[in-house]
Image (spheres, rainbow, N blue to C red):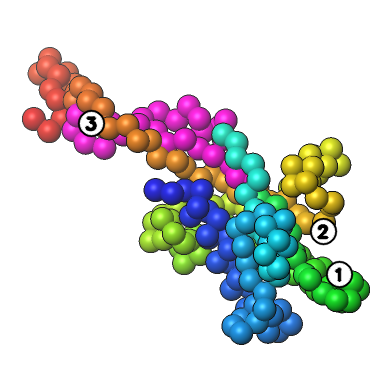
Amino acid sequence: MAALLATSQSLSHVVRQSFEADSGLGKLFKPPGTMGLSLGTPKEMRDRNKEGLSIWLYRVIRDEERLNDPPVRVGFSQIKYPPLPLRLHYLMVPIVNAADPLAGAETEQRILEKVLQTFHDHPQLRGMDLQGDFKDTESELNVRLESLSLEEITRVWDALEGSYQLSVSYEVGVAYVESALQMGKVSPVNVALPEYGVSIPVGV
């Protein structure tokens, strides 16, 4: 399962639906509108002369609270190795190439405000929200607006080798990367029968 990509696709799907339903932004993001959503960096969008919203996955960290989850018994004598739990950090950057800087800034703010409204009203993604490998699964993603310090913001934009642009950061969790190890063998579960003084394996 491509958990990182599925998370990005799910975010993009929810944002696109919100944009297309908006009376002002719909004409820009619905075909044949000129704006779209990209999983690439803001720089990549500008280099390709693309407009819209960059949903850039810029940081991936382990979820320490779930890292020690035990293996899951999936059969009589088999266990499934636990997945790697991750929290994903996305930078959402509106990109508008307007001839009039003021008009461009106004559109950027409308786009960003719609993103903020979308995830304020809809902080959990599940069911029909999920796309990619998450589609038709019981996965659930929690989306949280995070405040970055000036130092953190500076590091992000330094990595992009560009000047700061209007943007917000979201943390999304928990995305699980499944283990590629084969299922392990374990002893059958024993059930004690004290009245008979014996212990027998379940399933026997």
Q: Is residue 157 visible?
A: yes
Which residue is located at x 46 percent, y 62 percent? 131
Q: Which comes before the other along the chain, label 3 or label 1?
A: 3
Q: Which residue is mark 2?
A: 166
Q: Position of residue 169 (x, y in %)?
A: 72, 51
Which residue is located at x 82 percent, y 74 percent? 98
Q: Is residue 72 magenta?
A: yes
Which residue is located at x 45 percent, y 41 percent? 177
Callout 3: few (<14), some (14-19), or many (20+) C-alpha neighbours within 10 Å? Answer: some
Cα separation, mark 3 vs mark 1, equals 57 Å
Q: Which comes before the other along the chain, label 3 or label 2?
A: 3
Where 136 sits versus 60, above or below?
below
Q: Which image quadrant: the C terminus?
A: top left
Q: Position of residue 154 (x, y in %)?
A: 83, 42
Camera-side residue: 154 or 76? 154
Q: Which residue is mark 3?
A: 78
Q: Specify whether 23 is left or right of 201.
A: right
Question: Callout 2, which amino acid?
Answer: Leu
Callout 1: few (<14), some (14-19), or many (20+) C-alpha neighbours within 10 Å? Answer: some
Q: Tag 2, which secondary structure?
A: loop
Where 99 sits versus 87, above or below?
below
Q: Which residue is mark 1?
A: 105
Q: Is residue 151 magenta?
A: no
Q: Which comes before the other along the chain, label 1 or label 2?
A: 1
Where 162 sits versus 98, above or below?
above
Question: Do callouts 1 and 2 mark residues in contact (Cβ within 8 Å)?
Answer: yes
Q: Which residues are magenta?
A: 63-89
Which residue is located at x 67 percent, y 57 percent? 44
